[in-house]
Amino acid sequence: MDRVEIKERFNIRAEWYLLYRDGREEPLGPNAIVDLDFVGASIAEMATPYLVVGDDGDAGNTITEVFRKAVSNVIQSGGLIRFRTQLLGNEGNGDHKKLSIFRGATGVPGSGTMFNLLRINWSKAAGVILTVECRITVQEVAA
């Protein structure tokens, strides 16, 4: 199977303002978020992440799920967060079109809130044990 790497860039910025009683708003300017480890830890500590697999080709941030499983392991190192889910030989088999991590989810289809969405054709054969890893990288980028 070919390895597909997808790099997402987050532009994280804090802005400061002075708000006066007469309605004036004075921007003080953006500043850098210096504690990217905190942002990474906040993502890593999301409640009950689940891997959701979909077979639909619909546009937009939707998924018609055909399989879901609790994320097996979340590993955070600074601004890099890895969501790993091990699929056993009888899990998630077939040809698929979408992958997603849901937060605050359960084993019930449709539960939780979509955190991210990947549209890509991929397959898993019966009998194959496969680890699916979603890597989230939090970094500051130039404005």
Image (spheres, helix red, strand yellow):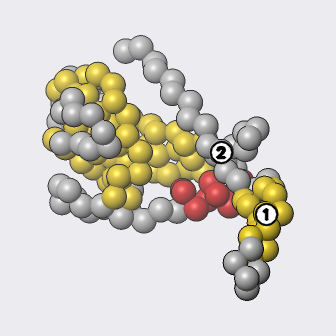
In the rendered view of the protein, which quadrant contains the N terminus? top left
Nearer-the-camera pick, 134 or 74: 134
Q: Is residue 17 above or below residue 9?
A: below
The label number, if any, that marks residue 45 in the structure image = none
Q: Residue 120 vs residue 33: left or right?
A: left
| Residue 33 visible from this viewpoint | yes
Give the side of residue 113 with respect to residue 126, left or right: right
Q: Residue furthest bottom?
A: 21
Q: Which residue is most to the top?
A: 2
- Dot in front, 2 or 1: 1
Tell me residue 140's x, y (percent). Answer: 73, 44
Q: Is residue 122 above or below residue 100?
A: above
Dot 1: element: strand
In the picture, measured across the screen, residue 126 lies left or right of residue 17, that is left
Residue type of the residue flagged with mark 2: Asn
Residue in view at x 56 percent, y 35 percent? 8
Q: Specify the quadrant that holds the C terminus.
A: top right
Name the kind of residue labelled 1 in the image. Pro
Q: Are marks 2 and 1 in contact (CB under 8 Å)?
A: no
Within 10 Å of disc 2 (Cα), the crowding (few <14, some 14-19, many 20+) is few
Asked if residue 2 is positioned above or below residue 48 in the image, the reply reads above
Q: Secondary structure at mark 2?
A: loop
Residue 102 position within the rendered picture, expressed as x and y whole percent measured from the top left: 35, 53
Residue at numbered disc 1: 27
**Which residue was labeled with disc 2?**
11
- Residue 132 is drawn in which quadrant? top left
x, y percentage for residue 90? 17, 36
Mark 1 crowd level (few <14, some 14–19, many ≥20, 10 Å Cα): few
